[in-house]
Image (cartoon, rainbow, N blue to C red):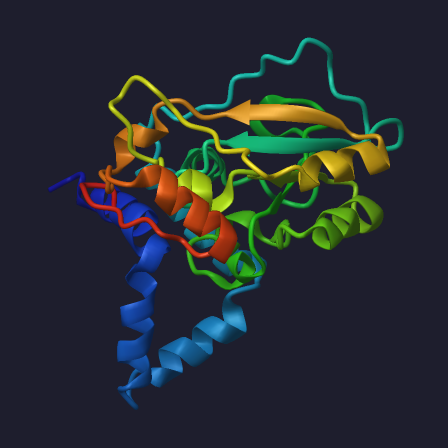
Amino acid sequence: MSDLPAWFARFVFHHVRLYGWIPVGVAMLRSPQKRWFLALYALTRKTEIWRSCVHNFFSYGLRNSPARLENALSVPLRPPSERRYLCCIHPHGLLCDGWHCIIGKDPDSFKPDNNAVGGVPNFKPFLCFSPVIQYVPGHQECYRERCGGASSASVERVLRDTDCIPAICPGGFAEAVWCWSNGRYEYSWLKNNSRFMAVAIKHKLDIIPSYTYGLTSMYKTNIFFRQQLAEAAQKSQAPLVLQLGSWA
C-alpha cells in the first residue's frame, strides 16, 4: 500500500500519456459538472507551477526506473555559437518512449536554463516529433516549450530561432511498427527517408545518433506483415501499430 502513489504515477505516465486521456476528456465534456476541470486545465497547463508539479509526480513514480542517458560521444559538444547539431533518435517505439522515460525522471531536464540534459554539456534538445505533441497531456508538462513538428521547416525554425539541438526520429510511424521484437534486436527504419540528411547537409550540421536499448520489451504488438505495414505507415503518415501488454 505504501507504494500506491508511485504505482499510480507510473500508471498515468505509461498509460494515460498514450491514448487514455482521450476517453477521459470526452467523458468530461459530456458532463456539465466536470467541464470546469477541462477549463481549469486549459488555463493552467502552461504555467510553471503546473508543469513542475506534474513532472515531479512522474519523477517520483519513475525513481526506480533503470532508464538513463549514457554519453558515448567521442568529442564534447560545442556551444551553439560555434557549432549546430541534429540529433537522430532510434528506435521510435510508440512515442519515443526511451527519451520520454529519461526526461520524465529529471524534472529539470527541459527547463529553459538547462543546457546539459543527461549531464551532457551543451546538449539542449528540442523534440521535433509532431505539432500535436505540445498539447498532449503527460508530454507538454515534461517537454514544455521544447517540442513541436518534424517537418524540414520546423527543424529549420528551431535552428533559426533557438539555441537548441533539433531532435528527430527519422523512422517515424514506419519504425513504430517494429516496436516489439524477440528481445534480442531493436529496429531502425530509414527506407526512402533522406530529408533529415538534406537538412543536415544544407545547414552543415553534425548528426548525433541516439539509440534506446530495451525499448521493445515494453510492449507487445502485431508481428504479421510488418514490412507491408511499415511501408503503408510511411506513405500514409498514420500509426499502424496496436500495442498490448503491461505498458500499453
Vertical side of 40 occupied by 167: above or below: above
The residue lying at 30 percent from left, 17 percent from top is 184
The residue lying at 69 percent from left, 41 percent from top is 195
Occupied quadrant, residue 110: top right
Vertical side of 98 occupied by 222: above or below: below
Residue found at the far top of this picture:
74
Is residue 96 at all visible to an observer of this figure? no
Q: Nearer the viewer, residue 53 or 120?
A: 120
Q: Is residue 210 left or right of residue 14?
A: right
Q: Nearer the viewer, residue 170 or 168?
A: 170
The residue lying at 18 percent from left, 39 percent from top is 3
Residue 156 placed where, x, y %? Answer: 78, 48
**Which image quarter holds the N terminus?**
top left
Occupied quadrant, residue 130: bottom right
Q: Is residue 82 left or right of residue 88?
A: right
Q: How many marks?
A: 0
Residue 141 placed where, x, y %? Answer: 50, 54
Residue 224 placed where, x, y %? Answer: 24, 39
Vertical side of 190 occupied by 5: above or below: below
Residue 84 placed where, x, y %? Answer: 80, 32
The residue lying at 29 percent from left, 33 percent from top is 180
Occupied quadrant, residue 226: top left
